[in-house]
Amino acid sequence: MKDKQALLDGLAQAVTILNEFIATIPADSLDLRRGEGFWTINEYVSHLADVQPMLLERLQRFEAEASPEFVPFIPDDDNGADSGPPNMPTTAALEQFADFRRQQLDLLKAVDDRTWQKTATHPEYAQYAFYILVRHILMHDHWHMYRMEELWLTRDEFLTELQ
């Protein structure tokens, strides 16, 4: 865990990076759908905001439980069917992302080394631990920010189609 401080710094910086990045994108590009099955940039921002409460709850469970067991996070509508990506107003999504990230960082800075070393079970992953979750949060942020940049700037013939 030599990179603990780097992870904390990266999580804190993600808020500024996302805000400044979104501010550079013309408003009419935020809701542009590049093709069937593609999310809009705003849907990605909304997704980042939407998952933060769940991620905070997982961090809290690691702190509170000896050996937490998690289930996959699959956002569903009330009928159990995929309701598609969230789509909240961009400003509200950015505010929610920042608010929950502050709460996550407060928790991360307060927990002891024992919590950072805790493991858990999760059916999606061969290994799952507090440290892995923290790193996963950072990588998740940046993967989606990269995808937003790709959707904004990449010409159609070079745009990655996700499965």
Image (spheres, rainbow, N blue to C red):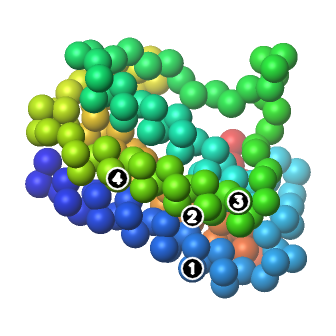
Q: Where is mark 4, residue-wise?
A: 105
Q: Earlier in the sequence, mark 2 or mark 4?
A: 4
State how far apart marks 1 and 3 are (Cα): 15 Å
Instruction: Name the disc covering residue 163, or none.
Output: none
Is disc 1 in contact with disc 3, using a CB cutoff of under 8 Å?
Answer: no
Label 1 CA crowd tier, 10 Å (few <14, some 14–19, many 20+): few
Q: Where is mark 1, residue-wise?
A: 20
Label 4 CA crowd tier, 10 Å (few <14, some 14–19, many 20+): some
Quadrant location, the C terminus: top right
Q: Where is mark 2, residue-wise?
A: 145
Q: Which of marks 1 and 3 is nearer the N terminus?
A: 1
Q: Earlier in the sequence, mark 4 or mark 1?
A: 1
State how far apart marks 2 and 1 are (Cα): 11 Å
Image position, residue 53 (x, y; %): 54, 39
Q: Answer above or below: position of 130 versus 18.
A: above
Q: Answer above or below: position of 76 versus 40.
A: above
Q: What residue type is labelled 2?
A: Met
Q: Answer above or below: position of 62 versus 9.
A: above
Can see residue 8? Answer: yes
Q: Earlier in the sequence, mark 2 or mark 1?
A: 1
State how far apart marks 3 and 2 are (Cα): 17 Å
